[in-house]
Image (cartoon, rainbow, N blue to C red):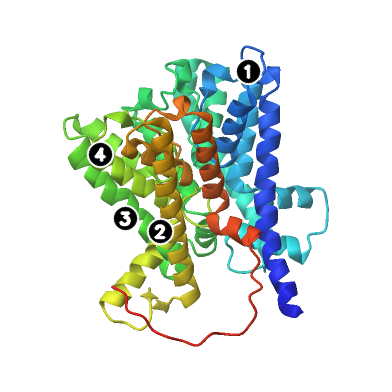
Amino acid sequence: MAFKKHSMQSRISPLIISGGFFILILLGALLLMLPAASQQRTVTPFSDTLFTAVSASCVTGLVVQDTATHWSLFGQIIILLLIQIGGMGVITVGLIIARCTGKKIGLRFRAMMQDSISAPQVGGILSLTKFILQTTLVIELTGALLLAPVFCRDFGTARGIWYALFHSVSAFCNAGFDLMGVREPFSSLTSYAGNIWVNLVVMLLIVTGGIGFLTWDDFRQHGIRFRAFRLQSKIVLLTSAILIFVPALYFFCAEYAGEPLRLRTLHALFQSVTARTAGFNTADLAQMHEGGSFVMIVLMLIGGCSGSTAGGMKTSTIAVLFLSAVSVYTRRHDVQCFKRRLSEDVIRTAGAILFMYTSLFLVSGIAVSRLESLPLVTCLFETGSALGTAGVTLGITTALSMPSRIIIMLLMFAGRVGGLTLLYAALSSDQGTARLPLEKISVG
């Protein structure tokens, strides 16, 4: 009876997290259907508003309507709110609202918050939530202040301030929505490809949002004393650095070799940073070689870090799988990292996540390719972008048929909420306590 009670409780958090995102998406889609949400003051079809709401809530950035030219200021505000809530997480926002209204926060709600941000323990979850809110506001406002001089110069004071705030929130939440369609629809940040200031600010916002709030909590507690950090933070920082600079070196040498040094360097760094769930681009991705597209697909599927605004399999998952492989190659009994041993449960979960994401990515890519009669690599790029909540595209999003759009929306939802979260919400874990006989099989 106690086991069944525990099993039921283990399903509550995934159900509420999934349900919270579903309600947020539906509410956002309905609000975007209002005539006031479009510049033409007409009702936007539900299929378009639903796709936009899913993309914004799941901080992806894939769009079927240009954000700047189709949506009014009211519509853009709705999109920005969806990005903000989706980036911080519906449970986090719910907990913040509950605290502001003076409601008592029970243990169950605290446990849900722990699951939502991948916190190591329930203790101190309320102070951590306060820290998340403060950190988010400080970084986003700082980013807006840094971007404002450039955008105010280019678009005027009022519009420039709005553009600075919008792009700061979108970048920190790794959403990839932009308002640069006023220059050319669906152009993202290509008009600022050579602007060092805009590139650096946006990249810093993407990275700060993508490394996770728990890592920032380590910085708050320990400063720059790396040895005192949690093991997760150490893995996150090391893996993130590798995933930024190694692909950037490839892009620098192979993709942008013919460009001037400054533009070549900015392009290489920006594409490496943005590919892991951010969704902006400063270069025409359709001009990339297939090798470059494949590298971006891998980065998109890996995504950001646990407990962050980013999606994807997460950097810690890839790090655990790499360390597990190293332990096999070196014939070590345990998987080790920074003089710590990783649990078998973590290793099994990492393997399950890799299998799930790879399966969803390949099956959906093949399905979209058949439905749209498009090259497989192009469709895999789109499905990888959706599943990793990256938001970059080779330009096929607006032309997709409704069945393909549904596939993309489901992938975005799974990528943000988490595939395992959806499975835990749908499946019961009540399998009893008995263990079957052990027998070895040969692999490899």
- The three-letter amino acid code for the residue at tag 2 is Leu
Quarter-of-image position of residue 258 = top left
Give the spatial CA distance, label 2 vs label 4: 29 Å
The local crowd at label 4, few if under 14, some if 14 to 19, many if 20 or more residues have their Cα within 10 Å, is: few
The answer to which of marks 4 and 3 sits earlier in the sequence is 3
The local crowd at label 2, few if under 14, some if 14 to 19, many if 20 or more residues have their Cα within 10 Å, is: some
Q: Regarding mark 2 in the picture, which secondary structure is present there? A: helix
- The three-letter amino acid code for the residue at tag 3 is Ile
Relative vertical location of residue 107 with respect to residue 402 in this rendering, above or below: below
Please indicate whether residue 172 sits to the left or right of residue 330 in the image.
right
Q: Nearer the viewer, residue 402 or 110?
A: 402
Residue 242 is tagged as: 3
Q: Which residue is mark 4?
A: 290
Q: Regarding mark 3 in the picture, which secondary structure is present there? A: helix
Q: Regarding mark 4 in the picture, which secondary structure is present there? A: helix
Residue in the image at 72% along x and 49% along y: 94
- Residue 261 placed where, x, y %? 20, 33
- The three-letter amino acid code for the residue at tag 1 is Ser
